[in-house]
Image (cartoon, rainbow, N blue to C red):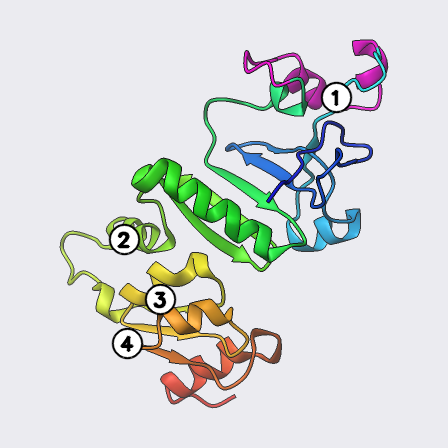
Amino acid sequence: MKYGLPHTTRKAVPNTGETDMISISAYTTDAWFMSSEFYTEEEIRSKFGMKPFLVPYPTNQESPEELTKDLNEQEKEWYKHKNDLNTQSVFDWFPLEGIGKFCFRCPSADLLRTIEEEIKDTYKDRVSVAFSSSNTLDVMKGGVSKATAIGEVLELINPAETNPIQLSEVVAFGDSMNDKEMLAVAGVGYLMSNAQPRLKEELKDNPTCRETEVTNEEDGVANALLALFNAEE
């Protein structure tokens, strides 16, 4: 299957034989680099609360001044640092260090599953790959997951002189494949009723996992917590 990577943030146009366009993001501690638009501005504000840096690419031999005239000062500073990949695309301006996560976004879930398989076959356990939504595939350093994050949090909040909180006492909620490890190791792992079917299938035999009665949009988390702690609304 062929897939195209955009060479411009203004209009992603596939080459001959390329049918699905993929938007790729790189996340550092202070920036979100994005190869092409995938969400509307309103969706970005409501979903993420931060604005990505849509990396420009000179498709018509624009001068650096013309290309960056609409960028803010921080974005202009980022754009000064061209890497040595020489891909002749926006990725020549992506950071090569300090990246916590890459995201592949595409309307086609089938295409993302193909990319998932290719990445796993190529990099094995050097990377951690998981769907965070039906159209988003996350790629991180191997061994990084929400399960390891919970372990780190427990170490931080457990004073040495008290009885430490055990992982078996943790309650977790999730609806996507990037929640799988966390749900599997928690004392109780709640899968939302509208969770990804693949997540439900892979955790169906886990004795500590259960499914909420309603979706996360119907207060599924709150209802489960009320029932768990025998609390009243």
What residue is pinned by disc 3?
A: 183
Extent of the magenta region? 63-87
Kind of residue at disc 1? Tyr
Q: Earlier in the sequence, mark 2 or mark 1?
A: 1
Q: Is residue 183 magenta?
A: no
What kind of residue is marked 4? Thr
Q: Badge 2 is on which residue?
A: 151
Assign a secondary structure to mark 3.
Answer: helix
| Mark 4 or 3, nearer chain start | 3
Crowding at label 1, few (<14), some or many (≥20) Cα neighbours within 10 Å? many
Q: What residue is at 82 percent from the left and 35 percent from the top?
A: 11
Does residue 157 appear anywhere in the picture?
yes
For badge 3, the amino acid type reads: Leu
Residues 193 and 198: in front is 198
Of labels 3 and 2, earlier in sequence is: 2
Q: Position of residue 101 (x, y in %)?
A: 48, 39
Q: Secondary structure at mark 1?
A: loop
116 relative to 51 in the view: left or right: left
